Image (spheres, rainbow, N blue to C red):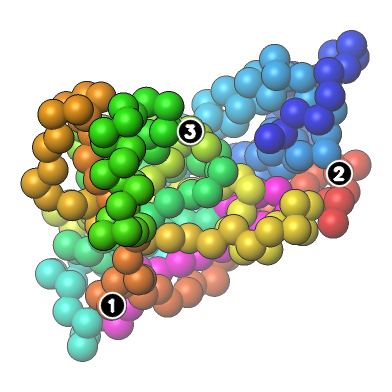
Amino acid sequence: MFLRRQDSRQEEDFARPQDIMAPLIQQIGRLAVRTFKRDSQHTPVTFNSLYDQLYSLVNRITPEELNLDVKLLTDRGPYDASRDGAPVTYMQLYEDNDVTICVFILKRGVRLPLHDHPGMFGILKVIHGVVSVQSYSHFTSESLDSKLQSLLNAKTLNGVFPATKHPKVKISTSDPACRLSPDTQNMHEIFSEDGPAAFLDILSPPYGTDKRLGIERDCHYYQELEPFRVSSAPSNDMTLLISIPSPSDFWCDQADYEGPVIDSGPGEQDQS
């Protein structure tokens, strides 16, 4: 997706000198722009190197480095819509045509419903509290036998597709960031555990209108069909997901980002 052509030139793989003294979140933002810029002349080796560096930087981030308002992290007990408003707060730090950097803040006991990230890479780092994450990966049609494929093609199962269900994981601030790719763990549901939680999210390409490809990249919501067992299923981890409307118990409000300004860095220009 991000690899336009092979090039014999070796792109600089390490943090640029002008970035080293910048606040950590600025370093992360500038490196994210370099990593995911789709019209750059990355080789696969260069992309992987930049991505690994970005992942390493993200694992160092804290709420203090984002100047996150501590009031947003106050534990007011179990979530109460009449008192607390939206269950989730969204804070955008940076966005261009190739990458979104944001923070999600979940009140005690709430969730981000099961949703997808069409064609995206992602890095999720918990910066406050604890979350549990239930992830899924798409099964390809080549992995299914004819009997199961016929079942899924039936009109009665419209909007249903097979997925691998990964083990549920609990993640705190001391744990490394989670990763997703266009092919693996691309769908997940996230729950706050034992109090409010917040995480930094880097996604590429962003949701919304993709000007480069001329498509609308929407977020879709799903529900797992349980119980599901078919003797011809390729593995015991396979389950079925069904597309659903956005859940009525989920909505977001927004908070302003007041930390260091994130930009693409000296010499970087966004290509619309």
Who comes first in sequence, dot 2 or dot 3? Answer: 3
Who comes first in sequence, dot 1 or dot 3? Answer: 3
Q: Amino acid at mark 1?
A: Ser
Quadrant containing the C terminus is bottom right
Residue of label 1? 248
| Separation (CA) of disc 1 from disc 2 | 41 Å
Give the magenta part as a residue range. Answer: 84-101
Q: Circles 1 and 3: CB distance less than 8 Å? A: no
Q: Residues within 10 Å of mark 3 (few under 14, many from 20)?
A: some
Q: Image quarter for residue 132? A: top left
Q: Amino acid at mark 2?
A: Glu
Task: Say if the magenta span includes residue 93.
Answer: yes
Q: Nearer the viewer, mark 1 or mark 2?
A: 1
Q: Residues within 10 Å of mark 1 (few under 14, many from 20)?
A: few
Residue at 26% across / 60% down in the picture? 156
Q: Where is 209 relative to 268, above or below?
A: below
Residue of label 3? 183
Q: Image quarter for residue 157? A: bottom left
Q: Circles 2 and 3: CB distance less than 8 Å? A: no
Residue 12 vs residue 72, the one in the foreground: 12
| Separation (CA) of disc 1 from disc 3 | 28 Å
Q: Secondary structure at mark 3?
A: loop
Q: Where is 89 relative to 127, above or below?
A: below
